[in-house]
Amino acid sequence: MRIYAMTGGATGIGAELKRQLQTEGHKVISVDIKEGDIIADLSTIEGREAAVDGIKRLAAEGLDGFIPCAGLPPVARPLSLIAQVNYFAVVATVEGLRGLLEKKKGSVLFVSSNSAPMIAADDPFVQTCLAGDEEAACAEVDGRDGHTAYAGSKRAATIWMRRHSVEYAAAGVRMNAVAPGITMTPLTDRVFADPELGQVMQEFGDSVPVGRTAQPVDIANTMRFMLSDDANYLCGSVFFVDGGSDAMMRADDF
């Protein structure tokens, strides 16, 4: 039996991954704002500390894996909440749990997005996130739009993962990211219902090369592999699980 911890395990992709890991006989410690082993508001520093402290109490022997899966969609308001949960909470919990991961040579699996490359790495919002200035990043994104907030937060988190992969690997901890396309979850339903973004999302979903949008199981299947021993040489990688959309949009980039 392995011990995993995850944020955002109550619904959607996180809930499906938790189910799969538990079916295999593993222990999964879940952090969520409404239901889970640990209840915490990851938009706040206090909530992040509560999440880390709670996981440490329940997994003192170490972690085989950590999945910071909690995230907010582009329709969340204020937009600064997206920066707080999708980027700053991710980095804070990963850093806070590093010692537990080193104990068992575990791995970290970030949840990126195929929208992340749509925002340039030198975008001011991305750069203020990477600089670790939460106040400035929140102020910057509150003057932008939902797409920039969401995709930019995922771009920043993925860059952080890539930049720190060598350092963590030297300590025995592999870090990778999965980049889903449109996946039918309760959060995605909110975006489809949005008068501003709903039509754009529908059109993008209709364009997926394989002919359909994803279900949580499609993403969780890949995530479970990335956490397994079969992926023990995978390090610093970003897996696009999006039915071919990234290849359609960025055929020459990889």
Image (cartoon, grey):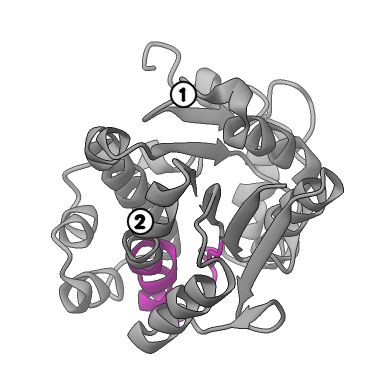
Say which quadrant the C terminus sits in.
Answer: top left
Q: Nearer the viewer, mark 2 or mark 1?
A: 2
Give the distance between the C-alpha atoms of the residues marked 2 and 1, in whole angstroms.
18 Å
Q: Which residues are magenta?
A: 70-90
- Magenta segment includes 80: yes
In percent of width and height, residue 122 lies at 16, 44
Most distant residue in the bottom direction: 46
**Image quadrant in which you'd find residue 162:** top left
Secondary structure of the residue carrying tag 2 is helix
The answer to whether any part of residue 120 appears in the image is no
Where 106 falls versus 225 (above or below)?
A: below
**Image quadrant in which you'd find residue 35:** bottom right
Most distant residue in the top direction: 252
In percent of width and height, residue 239 lies at 52, 28
- Magenta segment includes 203: no
Q: Please tell me which residue is depicted at 35% across the width and 58% down the height of the picture.
A: 99
Residue linked to disc 2 = 98
In percent of width and height, residue 9 lies at 68, 64
Q: Please tell me which residue is depicted at 61% across the width and 80% down the height of the picture.
A: 38
In percent of width and height, residue 46 lies at 38, 88
Residue 26: give its label.
none
User: Is 152 left or right of 212, judged from the image as shown?
Assistant: left
* Amino acid type at mark 1: Leu
Residue linked to disc 1 = 234
How many numbered markers are drawn? 2
Where 92 falls versus 156 (above or below)?
A: below
* Amino acid type at mark 2: Arg
Secondary structure of the residue carrying tag 1 is loop
Nearest the eye: 215 or 26: 26
Q: Please tell me which residue is depicted at 43% across the width and 70% down the height of the picture.
A: 85
